[in-house]
Amino acid sequence: MVSDREIALEQALVAIIGAAIDSGLDVKSLIDNATAGLLGDASYRWVEHPHVSNAIKVMIDAYDQVK
């Protein structure tokens, strides 16, 4: 079962992506860079697999909702 926190976090991510698109930012490149950073052990990554793959999927799914 999905927690209220998970729903809120996903909605927040979709809202941020939507606002970034509305602001004219290149969100596809941003998602690509974030994906590369997660896979490449960037300073903002603090989880291990499978959470890395799951985070990437959540970002892509959120982007697909608003693109």
Image: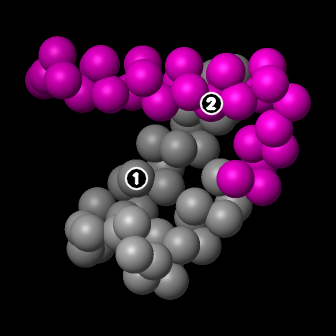
Q: Residue tagged by mark 2?
A: 17
Residue kind at label 2, given as amino acid type? Ile
Marker disc for residue 38: none
Task: Identify the colour scheme used.
Answer: one colour
Q: Quadrant of the N terminus?
A: top left
Q: Residue furthest bottom?
A: 40
Q: Residue tagged by mark 1?
A: 55
Magenta-colored stretch includes residue 24: yes
- Could you classify mark 1 by the number of other residues whose Cα lies within 10 Å: few (under 14), some (14-19), or many (20 or more)? some
* Prevalent SS, magenta region: helix
What residue appears at the point 17 percent right and 16 percent down from the top-left corner? 4
Q: Quadrant of the C terminus?
A: top right
Magenta-colored stretch includes residue 8: yes
How many callouts does the rendering have? Answer: 2
Is 8 placed left or right of 19 in the picture? left
Q: What's drawn in magenta, residue-wise?
A: 1-30
Dot 2: what SS? helix
What residue appears at the point 40 percent right and 53 percent down from the top-left corner? 55
What residue appears at the point 70 percent right and 30 percent down from the top-left corner? 20
Looking at the image, residue 52 lies above or below residue 2: below
Q: Nearer the viewer, mark 2 or mark 1?
A: 2
Looking at the image, residue 27 lies above or below residue 67: below
- Residue 58 x, y percent position in the rendering: 46, 42
- Could you classify mark 2 by the number of other residues whose Cα lies within 10 Å: few (under 14), some (14-19), or many (20 or more)? many
- Residue 32 x, y percent position in the rendering: 69, 60
Closest to the observer: 18 or 51? 18
